[in-house]
Image: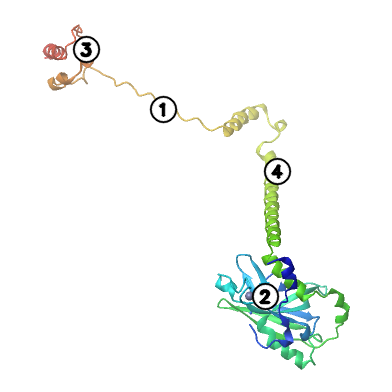
Amino acid sequence: MTEAAIETMTFGVSADQDTGSSGGGGDYIRYINKEGEFTFRFLQDFNQWTSYWEHYSNAKRASYPCTGQKRSCPGCNSEDEKEAKASKKLLVNAIHIDPESDGEGYVNLWKMPGGTLDDFKRYSRLDGNSLTKRPFVVIRTKKDGRVSYSTDKMDREEFNTAKYADQLQDHQKALNEAYRQAWDPEALAEREADRKAAAKRKEDRENEQAAEEAVAETPEEAPPFELQSKEEREAAAPKAKLSLVAPEPEPEPEPEPEPVTEEEVTLTTESVRKSTIPQLKKLFKMAGLEVPEYEDQKDLANQLIKLLS
Ligand SMILES: [Zn+2]
């Protein structure tokens, strides 16, 4: 889909024309992202809210509005069953009243779960078609892994919504942008580049930290030589050197030659007959006998047996 086509798309309808309801998550447009009570000061009455359908892509980690065209919407035609199932959302400019901050909060575009539609429709009717005369509370709870929302209204209080008129964000623009962020190749590439840059920054920080730690450790490991006596220096020097080189393998001990003494030479005629010529000559030597000069194994063996017996 081209960018021009995205720009001319219209997402959702005015909330007060909506009759049904449903629930889900996203980004850029703010949403209730944790369990607890969220208090809002709505800056738009119910007839200015936008109700729309949204898909959530787990792969893109992004939510985007349904085009409303079942046959061509990439969400409706997703192979991911969860993504293909759209959920109802409501869009409204609001100030989130954070009890932990002292300021009055910023104007943001907020996404309300579709399940709150009937409640807000009713609150609006009860207040003379207005949702700006009092703050409202949306409570997110999780039970058995299922997230659900409930609402509450607070006491009426004077509030000048006109003061924020120039800060209100355009619903269609924001939805177009959410769609673009999820589907425009350029936006996807930008997001990927941002993600890579963030990963690189994190890696650089870690490397820097590791380098700083290494520098901080050096004085402890090798105190300045002025603080050492000559003996300590000498004792420390070879140690430091040894720690830098891999220890040399222990040399294999040379096999000790078998000590041969007269007592140990217990020959049998059998073993003599099986001995080779050099072995036989050695045996002659060991027995203190003159080594014969002939080279016949049988003769040597017989001669040895004869002399020794
Ligand atoms: Zn769709």
Residue that badge 1 annotates = 252
State which tag comes first along the sequence, 3 or 2. 2
Mark 2 CB lies closer than 8 A to ligand 1: yes
Position of residue 197 relative to residue 93, above or below, is above
Mark 3 CB lies closer than 8 A to ligand 1: no
Residue 24 visible to an observer of this rendering = no
The kind of residue on which mark 2 rests is: Thr
Residue in front for this viewpoint, 262 or 150: 150
Q: Which mark is residue 281?
A: 3
Residue 115 placed where, x, y %?
Answer: 65, 83
Q: Quadrant of the N terminus?
A: bottom right
State which tag comes first along the sequence, 1 or 4. 4
Mark 4 CB lies closer than 8 A to ligand 1: no
Which structural element holds mark 2? loop
The kind of residue on which mark 3 rests is: Lys
Position of residue 287 relative to residue 270, above or below, is above
Q: Which mark is residue 216?
A: 4
